[in-house]
Each structure stands twice: as C-alpha cells, then as structure tokens.
Amino acid sequence: MITKCLFPAAGYGTRFLPATKAMPKEMLPIVNKPLIQYGVQEALDAGCHTMSIVTGRGKRSIEDHFDISYELEHQIQGTDKESQLEEIRSIIKKCTFSYTRQNEMKGLGHAILTGETLIGKEAFAVILADDLCFNPNGKSVLAQMMDIYQKYQCSIIAIEEVDFEEVDKYGIMQGEEIEEGIYRVFDMIEKPNKDQAPSNLAIIGRYILTPDIFDILRVTKPGKKGEIQITDALLQQAKMGKVIAYKFKGKRYDCGSIGGFIKATNDFYQSLYS
Ligand code: UTP
C-alpha cells in the first residue's frame, strides 16, 4: 500500500519567466486553483495521504497554501465566498504535509534523492505538478498506476506517445509490450535527437518508485546539462527488469510550457463553466 507522494517542486521554471521570478511555477493557477493543488488532489484520489514536497528558495507560498489562513477564514466566515475554500480545507484536513529543501538545483533525480528523508524505505509515488493530468471519466492517472503497481510490484512510469519532432523534450523508452498499453522497459534515453530515439514513447511526470532508487541515485553521475537524471537511475532498475511503463488513460497538459498552460486553462474553463 503506497501512502506517500513526493512532489519535486524546486525547479526554477525558467520557461515561465518573468512570472516565476518570485512565484513558484507550481502556484500558477489553472482557472482558480494552483497546479500543485490539482496534483495533491490526484495523489489523494490515489490513496496517498502524506504529501512530501521538495521545495527551494522562493517557494514558501506552497507551504502557506496548504495551511489554514486564519485572518482570511475569519473575514469570509458566513459569506457566500466561504464555499470557495471548501476543497482546499478538505485537502488540509485529510493530508499531512512535510517539506524539505533542495539547496542546489541539480536536476530531478537529485530532487527525488533530496526527498529520501521524507519518504524512508518504502515505495512511493512522484507527481510533477506542472504535468497536469486529467481523466474526467474514470480513475486519475496516479490511481491507474497504483493498480499496475499492485500487479507488478516494481517501479512504474507513465508514458505517452508524442510526435517524433518532440522527443528531444522527454525521456524516451524502449520496451516490450506485455499487455495492452503495458511495457517491460529495456532502455531509456533522456532527451534524444529524433534519429537517436528508440521510440516515441515519452515518460511524463508520474512515477511510482521502489525505495532502492535512492541508493541508485546516490551513485548516478550527472548527465545532460550537468543534472542528475531520474531516467539514468530508472535505467539501472530497467536492466534488472524492474520497470514497467504504462500508457495511461486520460489527458496530460505540459503546464511548464506556455502553450500547454494556455490549453489547460481553456479546456478546464470550458469543462467547469460551460
Ligand atoms: P523541469 O525540467 O520542468 O525544470 O523540471 P524547471 O526548472 O521546473 O522548469 P524550466 O524548464 O526551467 O522552465 C521538472 C520537475 O522537476 C523539478 C521541477 O520543479 C519540476 O517539477 N525539479 C527540477 C526540481 O525539483 N529540482 C531540480 O533541480 C530540477
């Protein structure tokens, strides 16, 4: 049973400058909720109640968001605005939040290793909040992955087919399809050129990881851009046949990019208000 979800949220968010100069990318709102709140709700829907967040300098508003704001609560008590806080209140009531800081931004792999202190020796989920996943007619993407984990008991990565022109933005996997939409992973390569890519199956921001990943990350050398890549660590598990890739049901928006953010905003607005 997986109960903890790690949110690496220390990145600089340079694609969104200047908006992210003083504000965390994870606090950018899609309609009226910050990205990280959607992520936390997804984790909760998948059965996780402990949210472990890796933050960095300038990310304090994330902690404040998941805390009670007494002044504000007092001000709007008894008014019709109170209902707008219902969802976040319910999240705060149901979850425990813990935080640690990544002092140097040495990549996603390093951010996950920084989270070890919050996770310990158990399997855990990872959500990159800027990848917003949406499956209105069924289970959330992380909940779907939990089902796969129950069966295979190893690390699970969520994948999506992308255009070959886009493979250089993602970790790309190669593997054998063992059930419809489920692959045993053999190989993975971070941000390959179009001609080096073994497939167009891209790893997106949802993972379930077994705790041996921490020992692997500890000895993983920096890869592209001098960053410690989670893809390189996962490759070590894959070589032992211990990584399953899952083509999830639903939609993903890359809200770390301006185009994806605008698309998500339009789609969510349409689905909520029309
Ligand atoms: P990104 O590749 O989107 O990088 O990180 P970024 O810095 O957030 O954004 P850009 O590319 O500069 O616009 C993927 C995820 O990994 C986290 C980010 O917060 C994001 O959730 N991350 C990345 C860390 O927590 N620490 C890092 O050192 C790097």
Image: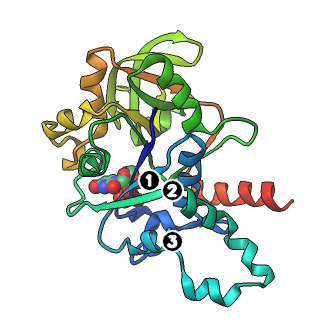
Relative to 107, residue 185 above or below:
above
The image shows residue 50 at horizontal and vertical percentages of 44, 51
Callout 3 crowding tier (Cα within 10 Å): few <14, some 14–19, many ≥20:
some
- Looking at the rendered structure, the kind of residue marked 1 is Met
Please tell me whether mark 3 or mark 2 is closer to you in this view: 2
- Looking at the rendered structure, the kind of residue marked 2 is Cys
> How far, Cα to Cα, is label 2 from label 1?
7 Å
The residue shown at (73%, 78%) is 82
Kindly indicate whether the residue at mark 1 contacts the one at mark 2 (C-beta within 8 angstroms).
Answer: yes
Q: Which residue is mark 2?
A: 95
> How far, Cα to Cα, is label 3 from label 2?
13 Å
The image shows residue 63 at horizontal and vertical percentages of 43, 70
Q: Which structural element holds mark 1? A: strand
The image shows residue 189 at horizontal and vertical percentages of 32, 29
Q: Which mark is residue 68?
A: none
If the image is split into quadrants, where does the C terminus sit? bottom right
Q: Which residue is mark 1?
A: 51
The image shows residue 173 at horizontal and vertical percentages of 40, 25
In the rendered structure, the answer to whether residue 214 lies left or right of residue 167 reads left
Query: Which label's residue is closer to the chain start, 3 or 2?
Result: 3
Q: Which residue is mark 3?
A: 65
In the rendered structure, the answer to whether residue 246 lies left or right of residue 112 reads right
- Looking at the rendered structure, the kind of residue marked 3 is His
Choose between 33 and 2: the one closer to the eye. Answer: 2
